C-alpha cells in the first residue's frame, strides 16, 4: 500500500468518525492514531521513546 492510499484511508476513517460520533469521536480517533503511529515508529526502531520523554520533561532540548 503506498502513502497516497494510506492517507486516503486515514482521511476516510477520520471523516467517518467525525460524522458518526461528532467532535469527541473525531478527537479520540486522532489521539489513538497518533499513539499508534508513535508506537509503530518505536517498534521499527525509528523513534527513541526515551529521547522523546526527556524532551517532554525538559531534560534535553532539541537545540
Image (cartoon, rainbow, N blue to C red):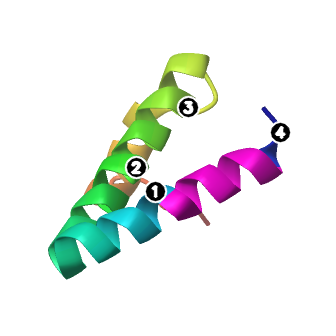
The spot of residue 43 in percent (x, y) is: 50, 19
Residue 21: quadrant of the picture: bottom left
Residue 44 in the image: above or below residue 25: above
Q: Secondary structure at mark 3?
A: helix
Identify residue for label 4. 2
- Give the numbered dot on residue 13: 1
Indicate which disc, 2 or 1, sits on the residue closer to the N terminus. 1
At horizontal 33% and vertical 45% (from top left) the residue drawn is 53
Q: Would residue 34 appear left or right of 63 to someone viewing this image?
A: left
Mark 3 vs mark 2, CA separation in Å: 12 Å
Quick one: label 2, few (<14), some, or many (20+) residues within 10 Å?
some
Magenta span covers which residues?
4-12
Front of the two marks 4 and 2: 4
Q: For this rendering, which residue is in front, 46 or 3?
A: 3
Return the mark for residue 41.
3
The residue carrying pointer 1 sits among few (fewer than 14), some (14 to 19) or many (20 or more) residues within 10 Å by Cα, namely: some
Amino acid at each position: 500500500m503506498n502513502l497516497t492510499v494510506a492517507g486516503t484511508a486515514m482521511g476516510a476513517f477520520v471523516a467517518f468518525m467525525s460524522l458518526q460520533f461528532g467532535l469527541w469521536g473525531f478527537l479520540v480517533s486522532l489521539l489513538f492514531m497518533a499513539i499508534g503511529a508513535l508506537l509503530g515508529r518505536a517498534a521499527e526502531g525509528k523513534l527513541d521513546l526515551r529521547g522523546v520523554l526527556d524532551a517532554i520533561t525538559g531534560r534535553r532540548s532539541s537545540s
